[in-house]
């Protein structure tokens, strides 16, 4: 049974992403309050974070408002599931080595975009709201 805060985050994020069926929110209670861990499809990670973390910060602001109503402190952690799947993406690359050089540059561009997104995600996790 999911609580109102989980349902709230799931609803917002599912409205934003391209793969709403892959949105998962885990709820943990710790000494700082309620920790919500959000996992999405790696392709949707940029949509959830937004430019310079604006979307993620907005979701956290809405959670803070919900926390005020429920007398709780909420923290949102966006989990990068792409870091776990790096081995599968490298095997895909090796199988596509026969393709044109244009696809290799597209892969490199996608990797740099992914690493920038991961870096932004790490910076956001350090923020205290």
Image (cartoon, grey):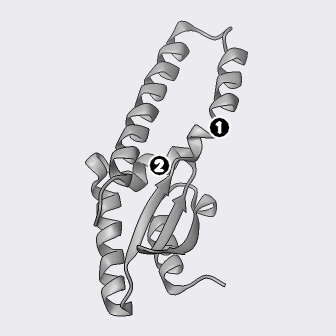
Q: Position of residue 42 (x, y in %)?
A: 55, 45
Q: Residue 15, relative to residue 3: is it above or below?
A: above
The correct choice, above or below, for 18 with respect to 30 in the image is: above
Whether 61 is drawn above or below 51: the answer is below
Residue under label 2: 45
Nearer the observer: mark 1 or 2; the answer is 1
Q: Which mark is residue 67?
A: none
Q: Report how far apart the C-alphas of labels 1 and 2 lie in the structure.
A: 14 Å
Q: Please determine whether, in this image, residue 114 is positioned above or below residue 64.
A: above
Q: Is residue 67 left or right of residue 97?
A: left
Near mark 1 (Cα within 10 A), the count class, few <14, some 14-19 or many ≥20, is few
Left or right: 90, with 80 as reference point: right
Counting every numbered tag in the picture gives 2
Quarter placement of the C terminus: bottom left
Disc nearer the start of the sequence (1/2)? 2
Q: Residue at x 65, y 37 (%)?
A: 85
User: Residue 51 placed where, x, y %?
Assistant: 28, 47
Residue 101: x and y in percent read 54, 7
Give the SS element for disc 1: loop
The residue that disc 1 covers is 85
Residue appearing at x 36%, y 91% in the figure: 71
Q: Which quarter of the rendered picture does the N terminus lie within? A: bottom right
Residue 99 at x, y = what percent? 64, 11
- What residue do we see at 34% from left, 52% from top? 126
Determine the secondary structure under disc 2: helix
Q: Which of the 4 image quarters holds residue 57?
A: bottom left
Of 5 and 10, the residue lying toward us: 5
Q: For the view shown, which residue lies furthest in the front direction?
A: 31
- Pick the residue in front: 128 or 91: 128
Q: Residues within 10 Å of mark 2 (few under 14, many from 20)?
A: many
């Amino acid at each position: 049974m999911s609580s109102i805060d989980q349902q709230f985050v799931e609803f917002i994020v599912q409205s934003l992403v391209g793969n709403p069926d892959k949105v998962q929110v885990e709820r943990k209670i710790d000494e700082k309050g309620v920790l919500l861990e959000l996992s999405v499809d790696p392709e949707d990670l940029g949509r959830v974070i937004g430019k310079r973390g604006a979307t993620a910060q907005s979701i956290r602001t809405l959670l803070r408002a919900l926390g005020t109503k429920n007398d709780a402190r909420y923290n949102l952690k966006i989990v990068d599931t792409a870091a776990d799947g790096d081995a599968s993406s490298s095997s895909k690359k090796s199988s596509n080595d026969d393709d044109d050089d244009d696809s290799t540059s597209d892969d490199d561009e996608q990797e740099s975009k992914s690493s920038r997104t991961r870096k932004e995600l790490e910076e956001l996790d350090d923020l205290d709201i």
